[in-house]
Image: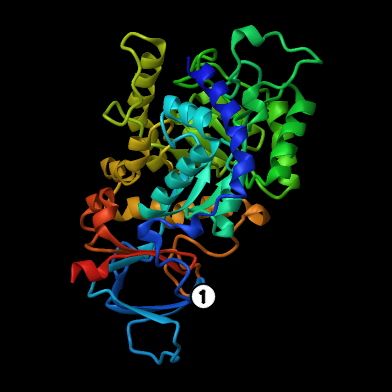
Amino acid sequence: MRSRHLIILGALLILLIGFISRISFAQNPPPSTSQGRQSTNVLFENVRIFDGISERLSAPSTVLVVGNQIEKISTRPFSIPEENSLTRIDGEGRVLMPGLIDAHTHLFLESGSVEELIMLGKTSPEKLFQQVGKNATAMLMRGFTSARDMAGPVFELQKAIDRGDVVGPRIWPSGAMISQTGGHGDFRSLTELPRTATSELSLGEKYGIGAIADGVPEVLRRVREQLMMGASQIKLAAGGGVASDYDPIDVSQYTEAEFEAAVEAAENWNTYVAVHAYTPRAIQTAIRAGVKCIEHGQLMDEETAQIMAENDVWLSIQPFLDDADANPYPEGSENRANQLKVAAGTDTAYNLAKKYNLKTAWGTDTLYSTEGAARQGAKLAKLIRWYTSAEVLKMATSTNAELLALSGPRNPYPGKLGVVEEGALADLLLVDGNPLENIELIEEPSNNFVVIMKDGIIYKNILSQLN
C-alpha cells in the first residue's frame, strides 16, 4: 500500500515544478518572518554563548554579525561603526547558540499525510507546493537552519529558498534514492514487472523519489544524473526497511562492485555516498566499497561498529523507539515486527557508537506527518537517553555540520556552520533559558527560541513581547 501511495504521490509532485518559479513567498511572508531581509548588521549584546563545541557557556559576551558572517566576538566592549543598518539585540543574559541541523530529512514527503498530499495535488498543485513551502518555513521557525535531505525532489525547493522566494532552511539535497530492482527505493507494484529494454520509467523514478539501477553501468548513470541535477551527496539503498512492501529488512542489496561504481562516480565529483542500511552484512558490504556514511544502522553488531571505526565511516542514526513518534503499523504485521526489531536495536546501536567513538550524526527521517515534523526538537531531545545535554547540542550543531562539509566542493553553502565563532556563517538562535541545563527547551521552539537568524538575516525576534 505504501509503495502505491508513493507512486501516486510521485505523479503529483511533477506538477509542482512548473509552479515553483512563479510562487513568491516574499510578497506575502508568514508573520513570524516579516523582519527577514531587513537587517544587514546585527549586534547581540549581553549573551552567553554555547559555541557548538564547549560543554560550558561563555561569560557574558557581545557578538557582531556583518552581512552573513560573525565578524567579532568579545567579552569586553569594543567600538562599533555607526551605521543606520545596525540592529541591536540585548540578550539580557540569554544563550546564543548555532542554528540546529537535521542530517536526515525528507522535506517534500513530510509535508502532510499521503492522503493530504494527494488531495492537494489533485485539486491544486500550486497549493501543494505552498504546503511544502510552509513545511520548510516551519522547520526554520523551529530553529533548524540546515537540513540534509536524503531522498525526494527538493532541487527546485532548494533553489526557491536560496532565491528568497520561499523561507526555509539551507538544503543539502541527495535527489532520488538509488535502488536495485526490488530494493528499498523501488516503488513499483508487481503489475509493472517485468521491466524490459523498452519499458518506461516508473512514476517514482520520473519524479525524483527513487531511481532503479541494476549493474555497474546503470548505477553509474543514475549517480551521475543526480549529480547533474545538483545533488550534494548520493544515497543508495543497501538493505531492506520497515515500511517496504517487497524487500524484507534482513536482505542486503547491491553487490560490492555496484557500490564501488557509485563511490567512484561520486568521488569523481569530490563528494561521497551514503546508504540506507540496518544490518551488518549490508553495512559491511557498503564500507568495503568505500561508502562514507551509514543511514540508520540500528541492527549493527559489535564487529560492524569496529569496522566503521577502523574505516572512519559516519553513522547517521535516528532515535527510533517504540513510542508515540513511531509510525503506526497493524499489530502482527511484518512491518510492525520489523519496527520492533529496529526499536530494540536503537539502544544497542547508540551504545556501540559511544563505545567505538563513531562519528555520529543525528536526524529525524520523518515521513507523511506534519505532526511528526513539528516534533523535530522533541526527537532531538530524546538523545538525552544516551548523551548529556551538551553532547546532544554538539551533535545537532558542529558535528552535523562536519557531515555536511563532507560534500566538499559540492557543498552548496561554502563557509563554516554549526559553531559560534568569528568568521563562521551567521546561523544563530537566541534561547530563553539554558539548554545545557534543560534540553527540553528545544522541544518548544515557539516559546523558547526568541531570535532565529539564518545567513545573517533575522527571521524571528519576539524579545519585545517578553519585556
Looking at this view, is 61 or 464 the one in front?
A: 464
Judging from the image, what secondary structure is the residue with disc 1 in? loop
Q: Is residue 205 left or right of residue 433?
A: right
By what rule are the colours in the image chosen? rainbow
Looking at this view, is 327 or 115 the one in front?
A: 115
- Residue at the far left in the pictured view: 467
Q: Residue at x 43, y 32 (%)?
A: 367
Residue 113 visible to the viewer: yes
Q: Position of residue 445 (x, y in %)?
A: 29, 53
Q: Is residue 208 left or right of residue 295?
A: right
Rendered view: 267 above or below 31: above
Q: Position of residue 376 (x, y in %)?
A: 35, 43
Residue type pointed to by label 1: Gly
Q: Is residue 402 left or right of residue 180?
A: left
Q: Position of residue 30 (x, y in %)?
A: 39, 55
Rendered view: 194 above or below 344: above
Q: Residue at x 55, y 45 (%)?
A: 312
Rendered view: 10 above or below 74: above
Looking at this view, is 347 or 237 the one in front?
A: 237
Q: Residue at x 49, y 48 (%)?
A: 147
Residue 299 visible to the viewer: no
Query: Callout 1: 10 Å neighbours few (<14), some, many (20+)?
Result: some
Q: Quadrant of residue 384?
A: top left
The quarter of the picture where the C terminus appears is bottom left
Q: Quadrant of residue 82?
A: bottom left
Q: Position of residue 176 (x, y in %)?
A: 62, 34
Looking at this view, is 423 or 175 the one in front?
A: 175
Residue identified by numbered label 1:
67
